[in-house]
Image: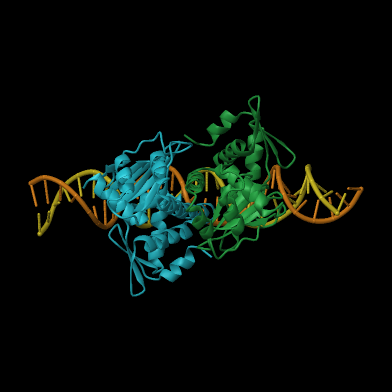
Chain colours: A cyan, B green, C orange, D yellow
Amino acid sequence: MDVRKVTDEFLKTAFDVECGSRASRQLGEIARLLTPCRGTSAAIERDREQIVFVASGATKLVASASDNREQVVAFHFGGDIISIPADGMHAYTLFALADSTLLIFPASEFKACALSHPAVLRAMLERTQTALYRCRDKAVDLGRKNAKERLAGFLVAMSERIGRTANGKCRIELPMSRRDIGDSLGLTIETISRQFSELKQAGLIVTEGRSGVTVQDPAKLLTMAGHI
Amino acid sequence: MDVRKVTDEFLKTAFDVECGSRASRQLGEIARLLTPCRGTSAAIERDREQIVFVASGATKLVASASDNREQVVAFHFGGDIISIPADGMHAYTLFALADSTLLIFPASEFKACALSHPAVLRAMLERTQTALYRCRDKAVDLGRKNAKERLAGFLVAMSERIGRTANGKCRIELPMSRRDIGDSLGLTIETISRQFSELKQAGLIVTEGRSGVTVQDPAKLLTMAGHI
DNA sequence: CGCCTCGTTGAAAGGAGTCAACTACAGTGG
DNA sequence: CCACTGTAGTTGACTCCTTTCAACGAGGCG
């Protein structure tokens, strides 16, 4: 697994740029390949902005408020691109939820390089906007929804991103723990657990082991999420 | 006040592109000028993504969750650029907090046009990333902070964006109501009021009328915000 | 100057947090 | 293959912060 090969894959997947191109050569030179194991944090420089391509695996981007309260700001899966700022009012750390392959670029060099590849720049803009829209929706959830709505919304989002739908039901294999879910939804692990229990009792979901969830009635779950 | 003139100003302010250029002509053709009055919503199409330049004034971007709970997702001031998605799980509306001048572009046409102006594309990426980082910090606040920390953080952010610092103190003229602040911080108007009172009693701020706030001790307020 | 909206303050209610005990996985080694 | 162990998850009782409901006070515009 070398940098060049993953960079080619990155450009193809994310920007539909052909392999072996000039862009690939240029970006390959500034890229760094990381393969963090499940549960470990990716060693990312904190003093400057970074751009990360998730070639495979699953990650959580965590912000640490003071007093070691942690907030999961976003989950990312294979094919996703993550922008991580230099340390500001909160420090951000990227953790692998499963063994992952990551391609890391210093943002300033990436953008300088992309300047001569407008298609790359445009796709990056598109993806950053998507991330922004997702983050805004998350802000709405955190600001205006109760525990039940938040968990329902979370399960809906996960079923769309990593679920497998078959005859009206959706099977999700959650790569994150209850704690991660709590840290993402601004709730405690106990509240998450209680809400899971209530959704089970209501017959909306079935759980298998720690990570398996089957959504029995996606439409009803969507209603519970309190979206429009 | 015509579209062309504001477009020129937009390109100069936001992207440092010279006036009367080809970019200006192209963008001027797809732009629409709006001048919403204080308290009114800007008429923005909901069925497709939009990009808005705030030439002057102040706005709030509001998401409506079901059950008419509202969440202010971001405040924007003169010089800012706002990306607004087509309706998804939440509907977004842009309100003028003061009489404002806005330049509206359909996002797809804007991006198509920008494709031949990499500098514009890059600056848009930069600004979208900034918006994303701000939104993430907001998510941390909403998910992990109590009322006092949220209001302190809000006042710190506002003093940085629209405050006037003089001999260690910072004067802010807030264009938004207590309700807007509450809707932004995921709190009720009463809680905002109580927290304002406590900050006043602690001698950290002085208020004048409904909108004037002077931060007496910015460093201490920053500490209260619970940032790192 | 008066009206009306916005903001402030108080008392009571509720939802999530905290603390604590218990249970069930999943991975390890025998 | 099974027993063991440690971590992850569940459930209950109680507390606390924010909301809710209500009344009052103040600012700003006509």
Q: Would you identify the image quadrant in which residue B51 lies?
A: bottom right
Residue B172 visible (yes or no): yes
Q: Nearer the viewer, residue B114 or A12?
A: B114
Q: Would you identify the image quadrant in which residue A94 lies?
A: top left
Rendering coords of residue A51 (x, y %): 38, 44
Q: Is residue A73 left or right of residue A57?
A: right
User: Residue most toward the bottom?
Assistant: A167
**Residue at horizontal 70%, vertical 56%?**
B40
In this view, B210 is above or below A170: above
Q: Is residue B162 left or right of residue A151?
A: right
Q: Would you identify the image quadrant in which residue A25 lies?
A: top left
**Residue at horizontal 32%, vertical 57%?**
A174
Q: How many marks do you count on the picture? A: 0
**Residue at horizontal 53%, vertical 43%?**
B146
Q: Nearer the viewer, residue B56 or B96?
A: B56
Q: Is residue A13 left or right of residue A224?
A: left
Q: Is residue B157 left or right of residue D21?
A: left
Rendering coords of residue A127 (x, y %): 43, 53
Residue B187 visible (yes or no): no
Q: Nearer the viewer, residue B56 or B69?
A: B56
Rendering coords of residue B179 (x, y %): 65, 50
Rendering coords of residue A30 (x, y %): 32, 40
Q: Nearer the viewer, residue A179 or B68?
A: B68
